[in-house]
Image (cartoon, helix red, strand yellow):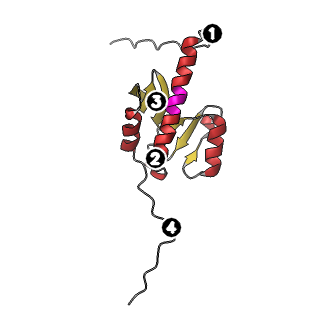
């Protein structure tokens, strides 16, 4: 009789998929799905808080830079940035490595941050806002 050995790696529930990302994002209050850099994204009251990255494997999520650096240091296989994002409050996430509960918390935090930023610009007209995009001419 063969002796059964236990796996040294604990069982992890399945990682999040892009459909999980969409489901969680759209379950949050006042969220609309939009196109951002030709990828699906999510806004709350017009403020982007998450979008799929052009690489097809990552998610771009709004996050305070200090918190972002902590998360990258704690789990660089899941969280990372490229040089493009160094000075911006965004983090890149590999959905294949994050659990749905952690993803829900991450998206909820990003949603709150974007909503708060939108309220701040609405109540403080001195904060510069980007002009509305011009309509494309019809051919």
From the image, tell me which residue sits under label 3.
37
Q: Quadrant of residue 124?
A: top right
Residue 56 position, x and y percent, is 44, 43
Find out whether residue 112 is within the magenta segment. Answer: yes
User: Which quadrant is the C terminus positioned in?
Assistant: top left
Residue 46 position, x and y percent, is 46, 21
Find out whether residue 90 is within the magenta segment. Answer: no
Name the residue: 65% across, 49% down: 73
Task: Indicate which disc, 1 or 3, sits on the residue closer to the N terminus.
Answer: 3
Q: Quadrant of residue 33?
A: top left
Name the residue: 38% across, 90% down: 1
Q: Which residues are magenta?
A: 110-114
From the image, tell me which residue sits under label 2.
101
Q: From mark 4 to mark 1, how far is it between C-alphas?
A: 54 Å
Residue 78 position, x and y percent, is 54, 50
Residue 38, visible in the rendered structure: no
Q: Residues within 10 Å of mark 3 (few under 14, many from 20)?
A: few
Task: Indicate which disc, 4 or 1, sits on the residue closer to the N terminus.
Answer: 4
Outermost residue to the bottom: 1
Q: Main secondary structure of the magenta part?
A: helix
- Front position among marks 1 and 3: 1
Task: Indicate which disc, 2 or 3, sits on the residue closer to the N terminus.
Answer: 3
Say above or below: 27 vs 3: above
- Front position among marks 2 and 3: 2
Describe the element under mark 1 as helix, strand or loop. loop
Q: Disc number at residue 126? A: 1
Q: Residues within 10 Å of mark 2 (few under 14, many from 20)?
A: few
Task: Indicate which disc, 2 or 4, sits on the residue closer to the N terminus.
Answer: 4
Residue 35 in the figure: left or right of residue 110: left
Q: Residues within 10 Å of mark 1 (few under 14, many from 20)?
A: few
């Amino acid at each position: 009789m063969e002796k059964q050995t236990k796996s040294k790696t604990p069982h992890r529930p399945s990682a999040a998929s892009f459909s999980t990302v969409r489901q969680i994002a759209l379950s949050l209050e006042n969220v609309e799905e939009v196109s951002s850099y030709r990828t699906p994204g999510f806004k709350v009251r017009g403020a982007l808080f998450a979008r799929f990255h052009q690489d097809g494997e990552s998610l771009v999520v709004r996050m305070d830079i200090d918190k972002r650096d902590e998360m990258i240091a704690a789990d660089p296989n899941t969280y990372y940035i490229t040089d493009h994002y160094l000075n911006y409050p965004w983090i890149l996430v590999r959905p294949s490595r994050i659990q749905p509960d952690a993803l829900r918390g991450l998206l909820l935090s990003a949603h709150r941050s974007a909503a708060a930023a939108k309220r701040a610009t609405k109540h403080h007209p001195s904060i510069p806002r980007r002009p509305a995009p011009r309509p494309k001419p019809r051919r």
